[in-house]
Image: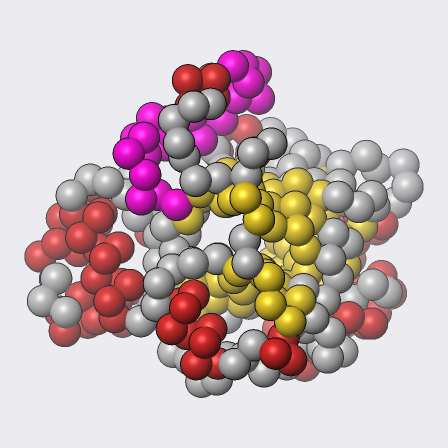
Amino acid sequence: MRHARAVPEWRAEELSESFFRTEHIEKSRPCVVKGAIRHWPAMQNWRDKDYLKSRAGHHDVYYYPHENFASLKRQEKGETVMRLSEALDKLFADDIEIGFSGSNRAVELLPDTADFAFLGKVQPAFFYPFIRYFIYRNAGTTWHYHPFDETLMCQVVGAKKIGLLSLDNPHHLAIRNIFFREEYYDDPALFAPFADAGLDWQAASLEEGDALYIPPLWWHGVVTTSRGFGLTAAVPWRSPPPVVAHGIRKMAAGHADIIGKAAAVNVPALIETARQLGLEKELAIAWQMAN
């Protein structure tokens, strides 16, 4: 990551929908949109703990005394179920060093969001609910990717740095084993063989009000660059048919995994799309190979 190149940055008021769709969504190229959500009421409301508790504190959530891991072995350590109000008390507390919680149930917060000036009508995502809230204190997210769906990572409170790497690289399987096992926490030297491998590492910095566009099948890992409480909202939508087709073919060939299939929210729509693309058999093969 020391040698990662910066992803392109655009200002929301200068980014047209046609350019965003043709140069980024259709070509699966990440970018940062500066000021993408500065018009959201959330920018003011979601930094207030009492407001969040009064609106959505009654929901049950998982709370973790560590960052957001990809492997269940690490993620489940210290896992506790509690009300969101209790999790917020912890994540706002100065004596808590690190913590993380997430939810897609807090529909009461939806009125604090709004549309994007550079993105018009889109279809619902295959795998993910309309919006996911990541609430944390000094906690990043380890390397992972989304098998389907486009995502805007919207930074409401705090700042982050994100590393990115496309699965379309000649060392994908070796990289996959390192990222999924997360053994690099104990042995950072695992990355040494790839120092001169010519991988196209990219990096993005998000400040409050910015959004990062993350295409499917792009590894991304997140670290915080601000201290204390932070809040990120992930907004997904369905990819264009050629992007969906590319992903299904890679998965059927064993070059990508269908991560999180058990939690997918709209599998019938994915199956129907695969049928329309003539890739129903390939999707079935990929689905059966997935963990």
Residue at image position (23%, 57%) is: 246
Residue at image position (25%, 70%) is: 241
- In terms of depth relative to the viewer, which is nearer, 137 or 195? 195
Q: Which residues are magenta?
A: 166-189
Assess whether residue 182 is covered by the magenta stretch: yes
Left or right, 97 with respect to 58, comes to right
What count of labels does the image hold? Answer: 0
Residue at image position (18%, 53%) is: 249
In x, y percent, where is residue 289? 20, 41
Q: Main secondary structure of the magenta part?
A: helix
Q: Is residue 51 above or below residue 224?
A: below
Asked whether residue 98 appears in the rendered view, the answer is yes
Q: Is residue 199 above or below residue 36?
A: above
Residue at image position (33%, 26%) is: 174
Assess whether residue 12 is covered by the magenta stretch: no
Left or right, 220 with respect to 12, comes to left
- In terms of depth relative to the viewer, which is nearer, 269 or 106? 269
In x, y percent, where is residue 64? 66, 39
In x, y percent, where is residue 134? 64, 54
The N terminus - image quarter: top right
